[in-house]
Image (cartoon, grey):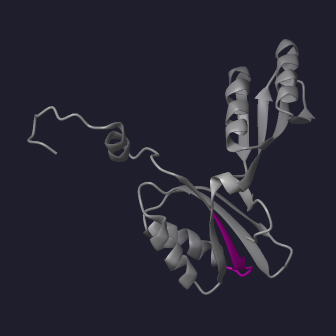
Amino acid sequence: MGEPATKEVLSLDELEAVAGLRTGRKHILSILVENKPGVLTRIAGLFARRGFNIDTLAVGPTDDPTVSRVTLTLDGALHPIDQVTKQLHKLVNVLKIRDLEPEETLARELALFKVSTDGAGRAEVMQICEIFRAKIVDVTKRSVICEVTGTCDKVDAFERLVRPFGLIEMARTGEIAISRGRSET
């Protein structure tokens, strides 16, 4: 930084870093853990102590009932991800961690949208659902609930299109991901 009151030009990267905006690679961590109470709290606490903001967090069972998969997404630009993964390995109930490469990963998200509709708007919302291969899972006189599955970009695009009709409520699962090919985790 220059002297106070000097007009020093900042690059876009510097400006985004100062403003706290997303600047780096999105990390998708696939973590296999023992299916025991408190494991998720310890994992989330580790990220919080290191100053990471978790974008999405999804937990579910695997083919082994004693093991769960935690899929966690975050922006790794502001802090190095290596240190936190080393700390994760030290947790007793963590079995395996993998930072999935975006181009080698299949990731999906599920979202439910409750949209305000009347007679004329209902047909348009149904048409948008058809374009996005979304399902209408509930209909009332004044609203419809749409189920959308796909990439985060697809879900975001769907939201942008139905929001003008009157988005009453929205629920998103967060991403789940799996690597392509034969590798595990």
Q: Is residue 8 left or right of residue 66?
A: left
Marks counted in the figure total 0
Q: Is residue 58 above or below residue 69?
A: above
Q: Residue at x 43, y 64 (%)?
A: 80
Q: Residue at x 52, y 71 (%)?
A: 45
Residue 133 position in % (x across, y down): 87, 34
Residue 8 vs residue 135, the one in the foreground: 8
Q: Quadrant of the N terminus?
A: top left
Question: Which image quadrant is residue 56 in?
Answer: bottom right
Reply yes or no: does residue 173 show up in magenta: no
Q: Residue at x 50, y 78 (%)?
A: 87
Magenta stretch mostly in which secondary structure? strand
Which stretch appears magenta? 29-38
Residue 102 vs residue 120, the one in the foreground: 102
Q: Is residue 154 above or below residue 79?
A: above
Reply yes or no: does residue 35 show up in magenta: yes
Q: Residue at x 85, y 35 (%)?
A: 134
